[in-house]
Image (tube, coloured by chain):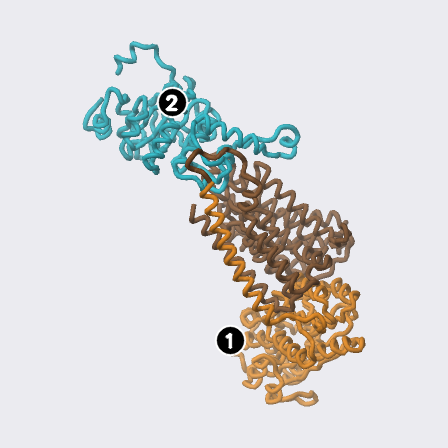
Amino acid sequence: MSFETNTETPPHVVLEARNVVKTYGHVTALAGVDFELRAGEILAVVGDNGAGKSTLIKALTGALHPTSGEILLDGAPVHFRGPLDARHAGIETVYQDLAMAPALDIASNLFLGRELRAPGILGSIFRRLDKKRMREEARRAMSELKFRLPSIDNAVEALSGGQRQGVAVARAALFARKLVIMDEPTAALGVRETGQVLELIRSIRERGLAVVLISHNMPNVFDIADRIHIMRLGRRAAVVTPKTHSMNDVVAIMTGAATA
Amino acid sequence: MSFHRIRTSARSKALQAGISALGLMLGVAFGAGSASAQEVIVGLVTKTEVNPFFAKMRQAAEARAKEKGVKLIARAGKFDGDNEGQVAAIEDLISAGAKGILVTPNNSSGMLDIIKKAREAGVLVIALDTATDPADAVDATFATDNFEAGVQQGTYARKAMGDTKAVVAMLDGTPGGTVDTFRHDGYLKGFGIAEGDPSIAGAAITNGAQDKGQVGMENLLSKNGDINAVYTINEPAAAGAYAALKSFGKESDVMLTSIDGGCAGVRDVKDGKIAATVMQFPYKMASMGIDAVAEYAATGKKPSGFVNTGSFLITDKPVEGLESKDTAWGLENCWGD
Amino acid sequence: MNTATASPPETSPSLKARIIGAPSAGPLLVLIGFCVIFALTNPRFLATHNLSIILQQTVIIGVLAIGQTLVILTAGIDLAVGAICVLGTIVAGKLVNLGYDPVLSMGFAVLVCTAAGLAAGGLVSGLRLPPFIVTLGILGILTAALRLISEGGAFAVRDPFLSWTGNTMKLGGFVLTYGVLIMFTLYAVVWYFLNQTKWGRHVYAIGNNPEAARLVGIPVRRHLLSVYLVAGLIYGIAAWLALGRIPNADPNAMQTANLDSITAVVIGGTSLFGGRGGLIGTLIGALIVGVLRNGLTLAGIDPLWQDLVTGILVIIAVALDQMSRRRN
């Protein structure tokens, strides 16, 4: 692997973590982890339960503050005070529970918290929402992602699990300027729907965004990831690619039975 | 989309079922109670449905209406103080074309506008039990003279206590209510003391309810153990007071008196729990009211002024110089059960 | 529906589908159904005078139910509506009877009601106490405070400005009070904010899924505070309308206003679990209760049936809500 990368110009790194430590009293959740997400790639983060996956993601999105270490966005150090800061910086997260208001329609959910206001005094003085534009944008976003929905006016609760996931991914894609983080996006889905969601993740990459994919599902990871970041005991055990390593290799690294 | 359809159709089916069930019930109700257009309609608007006093009033009105061949529509407030409910009831009765409305106003000033409107629409309005303020806001008032009833209670208490130095507790109903004020003031007059007299140990709000009467009495006794005369707004409050007195072991040392004439209250007098009560006659108010409306419908003649439906002191320990009836008579003429 | 061939065209739903799918369609059918039954039983029911009476009778609960709807949409509940409204009538009445300027007095009373709403909102959002308990506590506090302020009793409030909302005007043969017009205006304004602005979207989002609302960056606590504040303001306006209907301030009044307003909201199809429903349904719900009470009286039926039928409607409404929620 080092052989491979050395022959090319170093790729642009979108998000980077250097020697990040997070301790809770005597418990060490992150023991000096490094992380590197390159532009336009899908980076899978895998690891056993308790290996520090979700702590790492929370540190990257500002949901918690690292005890020490550095996080850099486009090469510049950043200090997120909360998820909103990360969002303003162009990082979108698809949460495992999707963060949707089920009774609201798809367009409202896509724009939840970032509603568009009508132009002119209707918007500035009367605070009127531009529902038409939000619907159109929502429709455009869904079709750009080649994701088919029965109707943009449906309540989210009327959608299947895969369709809901699609809406959540579309929301992230619509607003992300740098990267999208997805937490177990296929965990609750059937085979066909999982395929649809993986397709969506590819189309996000096609739009030039980098993707961090946290997943337990090895076949999915091997199907879609460009590189695989393996967590073990609060550290990065290795970064491998599906081309150079097999699923068994990755599991062996995860459990400490082998090194990269 | 199809999902949505299924959902709405299931919902509308359930709704249809609900609506037809309601329709059926209403149909039954209408079949039972439909009024013909020519009938003389009398409206009765009482304070609440739950008080046995008003229940008796309503029963009496219904019985009398049947005898007189008029149609009674009874409405009530939901609670003491439900002015809006009573106003709405009168509005509805005017709309229904009532010839006369008998009302026990919750609050004397709150009802004036709508009573005026009713009278302007040619409806005979009679206040039952509670007078309006001013009293001539209605055509006539058929009621117990509550002040007089209070005087009877107070006079009895004072006389029955002889020369004992009095320490008085006042168990009031709902502060500010017209009836409450009359009874309270009447008692003080009959007892021969003024508001603020040092012999008054304290007052409690009971809302005319037994539980609150008990709590109020307990608190007053804790405050002043020398209390030996207790005014109560009505018999449930008196029953509560008796329970409190008994728990303090003072039930035989205290002159406990009341007003109302409910059968439970008269039994308490018979059992010696209450020394005396002043009986009033809700059925008389109601049947006189129905008669007056029937008369008005037939001849156009309206009653006027205050008609005292009377009150009698009920006790088995009469005192000299004060007219009273015994509990045997009381049990024959009481209301409620 | 030919789902087999292709996905349906992406258009807005047809008008018909919108009407059938609207959450207030059911309540509207019930309202129309009752009106038809009552009109058939007694022709007086449809007299313009009688219809106007029904509207006037709906004003207080109708307006209180606007605030109640907002609170319930956030998955809260407000047991203090009636007490706050009575507080408004007593403060305004007391001040005017003491000789203060009626407009300022009423304005101050509305402010006091708004402050009471703000207090409830502060406890709910700041200390994260359950709305049921907070408003129950405020109900108790106000009940005592009202007795103290009013020295126990009801008193008359005779002032042309305070009772102005009870004055009538003719609108094409239809006699309406200004109170009725104010009620409709309030419904229109609050409907606009609820359905056409970000503020309203966020009310629904918070009631639907507060965690999601937080994650997408909605300031949930501040928003809740604003909802209770607006509700308090509305209760204050309701106090003015109440004085127009009955020129009297009574600390014992409106004891069932909390349950009555909740009834209107629930019959109108708004979910007690929050995030579903709307104002049009609430208006219809309030009208259903008014129509039932009036219509039964006109039909010569014991109005106890009103409580019974209302009770059944509440259960049907809640059952439908549960069914649709469970299905999803």
| Residue C81 in sight in this render | yes
Label at residue B248: 1
Q: Nearer the viewer, residue C12 or A118?
A: C12
Q: Quadrant of the C terminus of chain B?
A: bottom right
The amino acid sitting under disc 1 is Phe
Q: Are marks 1 and 2 in contact (CB under 8 Å)?
A: no
Towards the viewer: C240 or C279: C279
Q: Is residue B166 visible?
A: no
Tell me what residue is drawn at x 68 percent, y 90 percent. B320
Location of residue B114 with respect to B183 vertically, above or below: above
Residue B28 percent across, percent down from the top left? 56, 68
Most extreme residue toward the left is A257
Q: Which residue is mark 2?
A: A70
Q: Which chain is brown?
A: C
Q: Is residue C35 above or below residue B128?
A: above
Q: How far across and down, in percent of the image, does residue C47 sit?
A: 72, 59
- Give residue A244's quadrant in the image: top left
B182 or C72: nearer the eye?
A: C72
